[in-house]
Each structure stands twice: as structure tokens, then as C-alpha cells.
Amino acid sequence: MSDMQRLHRITYLIQARKCVPIEVFLGELEISRATFKRDLEYLRSRMNASIVFDRSQGGYRFEDPLIAQKLELPGLWFTEKEATALVLMQHLLSGLDKGGLIEPHIAPLTSIIDGILGQGNTTAKELRKRLKVFGMSARTGSIESFEEVGSALLKRKRLQITYYARGKNETTEREIAPQRLIFYRDNWYVDAYCYLRKDLRSFALDGISKAIICHTKADEIPEIKLHEHFAQSYGIFSGKASQRAKLKFSPEKARWVSSEKWHGQQVGSFDKEGNYHLEFDYNQDPELVMDILKYGSGVEVLAPATLRTRVKDELTKALESY
């Protein structure tokens, strides 16, 4: 990390968290106390940053919050077009960020971008008003451990978690080695090696009620193994593919399905009648059955027979409930 990157990081941490203990700076920046003191002195004397130590809160903060919002450091410039693109990206992320995970971290950058756009003909407020994002499958539960999971992922440390599995309705204590964060159907998941199950697993972040970063280094799982375990299945479910789905969509439904991505390794083709045939390998079928049912009579399950039976049973249950 360069000197200028450290300076930006120090001001960002204070802007985002309001008051920051020195231990946080030393841990986040991986620097010594002496280096932090030199950076702090540079910000105060050269950048006119009114950073003070608040004994009552036990950390560093800006003496005047209003001045903090206007603090500018060299090394970060955007043209109006670039700033416009950043506003659209930020608003898109905010629309998907139902748990409030991302917004606090990009708020300082947002204020800078708004200042840049305020000088042009297109305002950030107008851009945000014209862009709408709807999350249809997001769960409403809070995600309290997002920062711990993200920090452990970047620092390559293990996590001790308390996890509630909705499918089994049980809570377990586990130690995991996080490999990557996944945002899927408006919800966050972490792919990780689970030392309890001695295998790869996906954990819903809103199911993690407690997460503690361990000092132990996380085991690195090769990318090819992650791909084999997660990419061959369907949806968020993992495991090596054991079956191959073959679906036929009517010409009407084909107008939509032929442009959709159902599976990373799918194969699609049209027949002479205009029906669209879609094939892919999978492991577990709960999400697949739901996606098939959305198309009603516009889709036919050709194979395997077990999937055809599952869809038929779900339709029967639905009819009986009326």
C-alpha cells in the first residue's frame, strides 16, 4: 500500500465510522504505531485535516464533521462522465443492498461524486431518480456478520460461526475457511470449506448469527475444485452433478428462455417447430423445480424421470390446496 493510499484509507475510515481507535488503524493498514503517527501528522499539517483524539470515545475523529465531508486529498480525479457512471453503479448497488452492507462503506465516495456532478448539467439526484432497482427474492433478516466474513475472506483467516440452517431447522457451531462471497437472487452467501463437515459448503450470511475471526490461516481451495463443486450444480446448491435435465419450452416461452442463463454450462437449441430445448447437468433440484413451475404449461420436462415426477407432484399438491 502506497503512502497516498494509506492517507486515503485513514480519512475514509474516520468518515465511515466517525470515531476510530488506533488499534483499528494498525490492524486495517498493517502498519506500526510510528507510521500511523507520521501519517496523522502529515494529514494535519499538509492537508489541513482536523483530526483529533477523543478520549471519551477512545478514538480519532474529525473535529468538525462538516469540514470532514469536504476534505479532499490528491490522487483521485474523475471526469463528469466517469462520475456519472460511478453514480449509476453506486445507486444500483444500493438498490440491491437490502441489508445496508455496502452503503456505509461507499458513502464518503458518494459525497465526492455528488460534488463533481454538481458542477455539471446532470445532477446525481436526477440520475438516481431515473434509476429503479427491484429485489424480488431478498430476505428481510439482518446480516450482522457481513464485515467479519468479508474481513476474514480478504485476510485469509478462518471463521468460527454460529449458523442456523433453515432447511434442517438446526443451529450448529462451525469453523470455516471462507473462499468467496456470492450475491445470488438478492441474498448474500459465502462459499467456504467447513471443518465440521470436512467438505465445501455454501452458507447464507443471514443465517450466521455470530462470527469470530480466528488467528489460524484459512486453507486455500484450488479454483478448479471450487468450480467442480459449485458450478456443476443448479442455483445455490452445491455438489458434483449427477443428473442431466432436458427441458422443452413452447415457441412463445422460448422468446424469453432462449435469452436466459439457467446454468453456467447449459446447452440450448431450437427445433423445427420453434420449441426451445435446454439441457444442463445438476445435483439437487429444489430451485430447478421452482423455476420450471414458473413457466406452467409452456415447459415440458423430458428428462430425467425423477425430475418429471417431482414437478408433477408439486403441481398436484398445488391443485389440491385450492
Image (cartoon, rainbow, N blue to C red):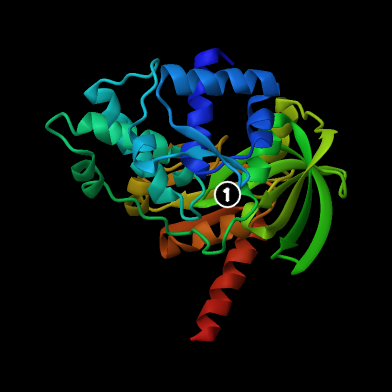
Instruction: Give residue 200's position: percent from left, percent from top.
Output: 78, 42
Amino acid type of the residue tagged 1 in the rendering: Trp
Quarter of image, res 209: bottom right
Residue plotted at (18% across, 38% down): 123
Quarter of image, res 210: bottom right
* Mark 1, secondary structure of its residue: strand
Instruction: Give residue 86's position: percent from left, percent from top.
Output: 33, 31
The residue furthest left is: 121
Instruction: Give residue 178's position: percent from left, percent from top.
Output: 72, 39
Which residue was labeled with disc 1? 188
| Position above or below: 114 against 274 | above
Quarter of image, res 108: top left
Q: Is residue 184 left or right of residue 222?
A: left
Residue plotted at (48% across, 41% down): 16
Q: Nearer the viewer, residue 178 or 209?
A: 209
| Position above or below: 60 against 256 | above
Q: Nearer the viewer, residue 65 or 243?
A: 65
Residue plotted at (39% across, 53% down): 250
